[in-house]
């Protein structure tokens, strides 16, 4: 996929009528917890996998990640066993995530999650921390044949928004990865990078993202990122 023009990385919306969020390490701190749990569960299946081996495939659709490191594992059975482990290991809500989701809900701005993970597991995590009710819809790897960084992963969602008179220029995408940035850019969406994942500020800047669109945590989105606050209709701004 061709790299989008730099200007698409630095645009601000005039209004915000919908928000798209990545899930892992954007809303909930999942990576370190999930890595340890995946290694343990894979070990229970007789697969001794090193962290570096797992990280080589990190970000792939969840079923592809498992098949890449343990191709002979029965995925459906593995998913159930891994899910049980997840229920015992509740993830941590990242700073500002709860405030953001509740804020969007309070002003009737829908929030959609687009994840390479399993929708079933994302729902389970959000329910465990009592945030599922604030999310409008979750798109997991099961819901589309395309996956990040392929921009087509958003086509069904953006088409559904278009039918509700929400244009791409009024949508903000929030994510922690360069793949999220690429998906947002090829779809002409405003993008905010949050530095709670694997990628650094320097990496986002090298990819063409302006510094004002890079935040250390979601707490800054409402507290320090003025353009984000004022992009809501004046009557809806808290």
Image: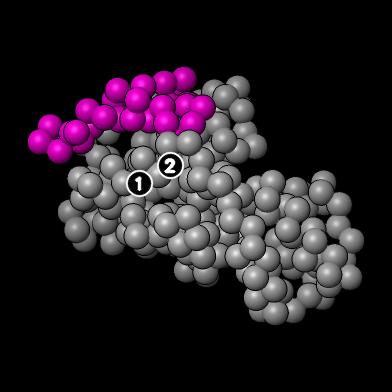
- Label 1: element kind: helix
* Residue 196 drawn at (x, y percent): 57, 35
Quick one: which residue is furthest to the left in this view? 235
In the picture of the structure, the residue carrying the numbered disc 1 is: 101
**Where does the magenta region start and end?**
210-238
In the picture of the structure, the residue carrying the numbered disc 2 is: 97
Image quadrant in which the C terminus is located: top left
Marks 2 and 1 in Cβ contact (< 8 Å): yes
- Label 2: element kind: helix
Q: Which mark is residue 23?
A: none
Q: Residue at x 40, y 55 (%)?
A: 131
- The answer to whether residue 190 is left or right of residue 127 is left
* Residue 79 drawn at (x, y percent): 66, 72
- The answer to whether residue 170 is left or right of residue 118 is left
Quarter assignment of residue 205: top right
Residue 145 visible in the snapshot: no
* Residue 9 drawn at (x, y percent): 43, 30
């Amino acid at each position: 996929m061709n790299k989008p023009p730099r200007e698409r990385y630095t645009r601000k919306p005039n209004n915000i009528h919908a928000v798209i969020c990545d899930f892992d390490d954007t809303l909930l701190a999942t990576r370190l917890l999930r890595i340890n749990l995946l290694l343990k569960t894979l070990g229970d299946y007789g697969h001794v996998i090193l962290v570096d081996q797992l990280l080589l495939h990190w970000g792939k659709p969840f079923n592809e990640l498992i098949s890449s490191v343990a191709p002979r594992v029965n995925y459906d059975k593995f998913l159930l066993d891994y899910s049980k482990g997840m229920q015992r290991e509740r993830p941590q809500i990242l700073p500002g995530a709860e405030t953001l989701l509740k804020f969007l809900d309070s002003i009737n701005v829908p929030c959609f999650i687009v994840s390479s993970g399993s929708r079933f597991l994302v729902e389970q995590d959000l329910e465990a921390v009592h945030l599922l009710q604030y999310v409008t819809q979750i798109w997991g790897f099961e819901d589309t044949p395309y996956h990040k960084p392929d921009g087509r992963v958003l086509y069904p969602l953006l088409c559904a928004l278009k039918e509700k008179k929400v244009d791409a220029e009024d949508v903000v995408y929030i994510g922690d990865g360069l793949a999220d940035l690429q998906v947002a850019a090829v779809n002409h969406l405003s993008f905010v990078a949050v530095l709670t994942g694997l990628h650094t500020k320097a990496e986002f800047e090298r990819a063409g993202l302006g510094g004002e669109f890079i935040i250390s945590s979601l707490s800054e989105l409402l507290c320090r990122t003025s353009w984000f606050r004022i992009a809501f209709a004046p009557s809806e701004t808290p």
